[in-house]
Amino acid sequence: MSSKRPTSRDVARQAGVSVATVSRTITRPEDVNEETREHVLSVMRQMGYRANRAAADLRRGSSKTLLVLVSDITNAFFSEFFKGIEEEARQHGYVVLIGDTSEVASNERVYSNMLLMNQAGGLILNTYDFPADLMPTNGDGSYKGPPLVSCAGHKDVDVPSVRTDDALGGRLAAEHLIELGHKDIIQICGPLQVHGFERRYFGFRQALKQAGIDIQEERARVGLLSVQFGIDAAHRLVDEGSLPTAVFVHNDETATGFLHGLANRGIRVPDDISVVGYDDMPYAAVFNPGLTTVHLPRRRWGQLACQKLISVLENDKNASQPVIIPPTLVPRASTAAPRR
């Protein structure tokens, strides 16, 4: 496969249109009918074509822009992550545009088009799935699209990445509960097709296995993490009479729902059951009881992701090396030695 960067003339030839049509698709898309515009953009994606950034910026008179895509912009988890990106970007003369892919599938196409037409210089991606429009089309999994950095450790494509060590996070949660003397432990998990939740799940299981503790895989609760999911999981465990002595919940939002659900049923934490969350959201420290949780340095994560993307844009030879950020455990009042 040739490493030569495709030109607008190559795109025009492949799409069966004029070079002028390709140029208008990039610079004045509103002047190109929708069918032709989508056809040209599709060919650009297939070929890994990208408009000349310097020329595009000169024409628009715009500043350098980085695009950040997340799975749910309303999730408070991302606030510190965004702040870290913005702080780092500003130091290097970039501005940041934030996008949400959670509710409208066509959003991904809008954002991928922005990258193709250089309305954004590069992408920081922290979503469950890799955008379909940017997936490799050459069959060997290699990526040739716009510059981007994955923060979710997407396994489907080989791109520069900055992610947290979720396997270690799951292990830290398990080891904390094991050290307290717990043996009857279950997990409340996010969707295991999402790589971060999968890594937490198996990191936790591996620690239990090494300690000779029964994993009780069939008792794990798996679903879309939310406060309500946590409440429902607590109610089911209590109503079934199958309350373990400890639970590891895959994020703090669900853990707080779980704590609330236990309180609704008169279950005391940590007297009757210990609970460990994940993320170390600001409210974890002030919840009653304070939530033991796995801390993710979200602002630092954002800073490192932005640094990585700028390295990619500057063709740094080390930009392809992954960065994996270790989490830490923060013990609080929601965990204690088992009392039954």
Image (cartoon, rainbow, N blue to C red):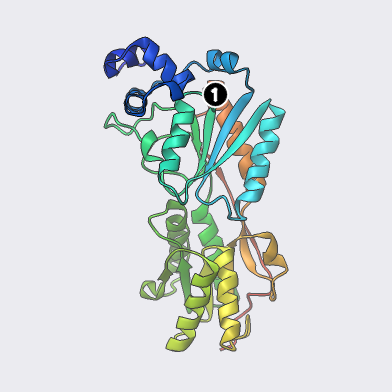
Specify the amino acid type for callout 1: Leu
Depth check: give the residue in front, 329 or 312: 312
**Quadrant location of the C terminus?**
bottom right
Is residue 243 visible in this depiction of the protein? no
Depth check: give the residue in front, 106 or 235: 106
Determine the image quadrant of residue 2.
Answer: top left
- Is 72 on the left-hand or right-hand side of 336? left
- Is 293 on the left-hand or right-hand side of 152? right
Is residue 106 visible in this depiction of the protein? yes
Depth check: give the residue in front, 182 or 4: 4
Image location (x, y in percent) of residue 266: 59, 89
Determine the image quadrant of residue 95.
Answer: top right
Image location (x, y in percent) of residue 297: 64, 50
**Is the residue 151 above or below the residue 35 in the image?**
below
Determine the image quadrant of residue 339.
Answer: bottom right
Q: Tell me how many marks there are.
A: 1
Image location (x, y in percent) of residue 293: 62, 64
**Is the residue 121 above or below the residue 280 in the image?**
above
Give the structural element (helix, strand or loop) at label 1: helix
Q: Which residue is found at the position 63% from the left and 80% from the top? A: 270
Q: Which residue is found at the position 60% from the left and 50% from the top? A: 78
Q: Which residue is found at the position 40% from the left and 46% from the top? A: 105
**Quadrant location of the N terminus?**
top left
Residue indicated by mark 1: 313
Q: Which residue is found at the position 32% from the left and 34% from the top? A: 141
- Is 46 on the left-hand or right-hand side of 244? left
User: Few, some or many C-alpha atoms within 10 Å of disc 1 (few <14, some 14-19, many ≥20)?
Assistant: some
Image location (x, y in percent) of residue 147: 48, 28
